[in-house]
């Protein structure tokens, strides 16, 4: 099936925005991350700006399950990320791997990252992060 355009899905008034089939939540959360991590400046960002593609359809650095419907990994090390980490990453509930090492991400690690119950690998080293590690990650 076809996805609704992202620009419509992000509007709360759009009547299909609560339908995962047309407006997958992972796409909304990844787009928020893209914006906060200054995605337009990334070294590689293929398909991240696409209005219609699901993240499992070739978004650079995104890994998915065997059905190609669920985001399970985000690997964007050494890719020119800056800005800050979006709390929306903590809403990609199926995320098993998050590897953003060797970038220029600033600020704190959002406590929401601690909500990722499936997370097995986390690599945020060689960034400019400050503050405490969220207690749910310790």
Image (cartoon, rainbow, N blue to C red):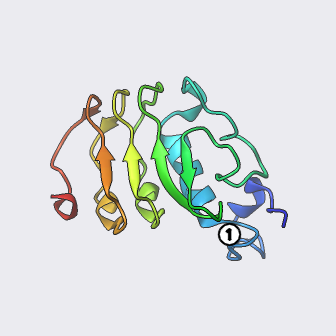
Callout count: 1
The quadrant of the image that shows the N terminus is bottom right
Question: Residue 13, percent across and down?
Answer: 73, 71
Q: Nearer the viewer, residue 75 or 31?
A: 75
The quadrant of the image that shows the C terminus is bottom left
Residue at the image point whose x is 65% and y is 65% from the top: 67
Question: Residue 59, percent across and down?
Answer: 64, 43
Drawn side of residue 117 relative to residue 34, left or right = left
Q: Where is 62 relative to 138, above or below?
A: above
Residue at the image point whose x is 34% and y is 27% from the top: 102
Residue labelled with disc 1: 12
Drawn side of residue 107 relative to residue 130, left or right = right
Name of the residue lying farthest toward the right: 2
Residue at the image point whose x is 34% and y is 33% from the top: 101
Question: Residue 120, percent across and down?
Answer: 32, 57
Residue 87: quadrant of the picture: bottom left
Local packing at callout 1 (Cα closer than 10 Å; few below 14, some 14-19, many 20+) is few
Q: Where is 13 relative to 39, above or below?
A: below
Q: Nearer the viewer, residue 97 or 102?
A: 97
Residue at the image point whose x is 80% and y is 62% from the top: 4
Q: Nearer the viewer, residue 26 or 33?
A: 26
Q: Nearer the viewer, residue 39 or 65?
A: 65
Drawn side of residue 115 relative to residue 34, left or right = left
Q: Secondary structure at mark 1?
A: loop
């Amino acid at each position: 099936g076809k996805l609704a355009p992202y620009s419509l899905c992000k509007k709360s008034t759009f009547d299909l925005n609560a339908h995962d089939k047309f407006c997958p939540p992972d796409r909304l959360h990844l787009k928020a991350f893209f914006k906060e991590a200054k995605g337009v400046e990334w070294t590689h960002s293929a398909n991240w700006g696409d209005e219609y593609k699901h993240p499992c359809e070739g978004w650079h650095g995104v890994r998915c399950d065997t059905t190609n419907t669920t985001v399970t990994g985000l690997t964007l090390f050494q890719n020119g990320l800056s800005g800050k980490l979006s709390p929306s990453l903590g809403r990609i509930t199926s995320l098993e791997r998050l590897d953003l090492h060797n970038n220029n991400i600033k600020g704190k690690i959002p406590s929401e990252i601690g909500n990722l119950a499936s997370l097995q690998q986390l690599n945020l080293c060689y960034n400019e992060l400050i503050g405490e590690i969220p207690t749910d990650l310790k």
